[in-house]
Amino acid sequence: SQQGEEDPQALSIQEGENATMNCSYKTSINNLQWYRQNSGRGLVHLILIRSNEREKHSGRLRVTLDTSKKSSSLLITASRAADTASYFCATANAGGTSYGKLTFGQGTILTVHP
Amino acid sequence: DVKVTQSSRYLVKRTGEKVFLECVQDMDHENMFWYRQDPGLGLRLIYFSYDVKMKEKGDIPEGYSVSREKKERFSLILESASTNQTSMYLCASSLPDSFPSGANVLTFGAGSRLTVL
């Protein structure tokens, strides 16, 4: 079953602009993660935010988490053409032993034009 | 550099063939996963394993089986390939939940794109 739903499905911006992607989920979570996928390749982990955190930064990435709304956003500041990729949110559900299972959203395709 | 290696990047098989997708990780991770990725559907979990010889069904296990005889190797098996199994298959691994940090973070292989004719 799909947990994360991402919005927008596709985003096209110019280099230097900021890109914001949103993710909504349905159940209680331990943490939420964002991954990046370059075309035709595997996913690469970007950042993890725990359920008791509200905001986290890593370089040009800023992630927020609102557990009351069951939503998260990923902001990429000062985007570059090399940021062109698909971005996925993934959730680790709360309760029990998850064995590290993550449930992924459908992804946002980001295109950054030089 | 730690990594997850999937043996085949591209495969073309015929309907009814038995297909093996191999995945090896060199990080001594307990957990290993097989996902399939299809346009508009994101990643869907097929099977996962939390220890040698242990396996659990994911969300879409039908038509697949897995094998984990050694900690570093997790194989996905399509007993009789069908055209609706044409997809990108992604293997991943992670530390166990008991680790205070790094747990749940998946390291992915480059993917295996399977076409079933």
Image: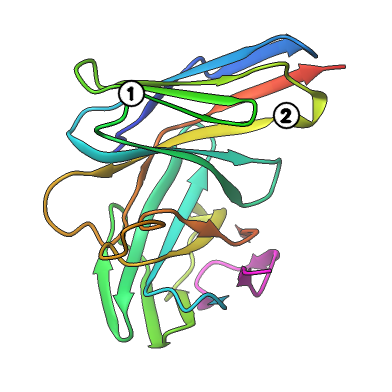
x, y percentage for residue B113?
64, 57
**Chain bearing mark 2:** A
State the residue position of label 1.
A54
Query: Which residue is found at the position 50% from the left and 34% from the top?
Result: A88
Number of callouts in the render? Answer: 2
Q: Which mark is residue B10?
A: none
Judge left or right: residue A47 versus residue A83.
Answer: left
At label 1, counting other C-alpha atoms closer than 10 Å, the crowd grade (few under 14, some 14-19, many 20 or more) is few
Judge left or right: residue A67 versus residue A76.
Answer: left
x, y percentage for residue B17?
53, 76
Q: Tag 2, which secondary structure?
A: helix
Q: Quadrant of residue A5?
A: top left
Quadrant of the image for the N terminus of chain B?
A: bottom right
Q: Earlier in the sequence, mark 2 or mark 1?
A: 1
Q: Quadrant of residue A72?
A: top left
x, y percentage for residue A37?
63, 41
How far apart are the two marked residues, 2 and 1, measured between alpha carbons?
A: 24 Å
Q: Nearer the viewer, residue A58 or A75?
A: A58
Instruction: Decide: is B13 above or below B104.
Output: below
Magenta highlight range: B1-20
Which amino acid lies under the numbered mark 2 shown in the image of this protein?
Asp
Tell whether position A53 is magenta.
no
Query: Which residue is found at the position 32% from the left and 67% from the top?
Result: B96
Which amino acid lies under the numbered mark 1 shown in the image of this protein?
Arg
State the residue position of label 2.
A83
